[in-house]
Image (cartoon, helix red, strand yellow):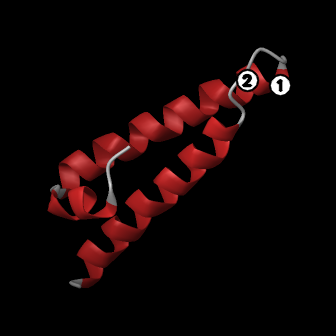
Amino acid sequence: MAATKELRAMDTAKLTEELSKSQEELFKLRFQHATSQLEKTHRLNELKKDIARIQTVMNQVKSGR
């Protein structure tokens, strides 16, 4: 995932695309985790944090920061 500086350089459309990709990947990983097929469980926490970063940057863009 991109660093916060890279996220801030993206436009809103690209941020929305990254958010949907991350959410879709998180959904798939949750299913793998539930069926005990996921080996890298730390990836779940990483994705949650990435989604939060993207949402934070999107909110900052909306509020004009």
Amino acid beneath label 2: Phe
Residue 20: where, in percent of width, then height? 41, 40
Q: Does 9 sit above or below residue 62?
A: above
| Number of other residues with Cα within 10 Å of mark 1, as a class: few under 14, some 14 to 19, many 20 or more | few
Quadrant in the picture for the C terminus: bottom left
CA distance for labels 1 and 2:
5 Å
Residue 8: where, in percent of width, then height? 22, 64
Amino acid beneath label 1: Ala
How many dots with numbers? 2
Quadrant in the picture for the N terminus: top left
Q: Does residue 7 appear left or right of residue 56 in this picture?
A: left
Q: Are marks 1 and 2 in contact (CB under 8 Å)?
A: yes
Residue under the image location 65 percent in, 48 percent down: 45
Question: Where, by quadrant of the figure, is residue 32 drawn?
Answer: top right
Q: Which residue is mark 1?
A: 34
Q: Which residue is mark 2?
A: 31
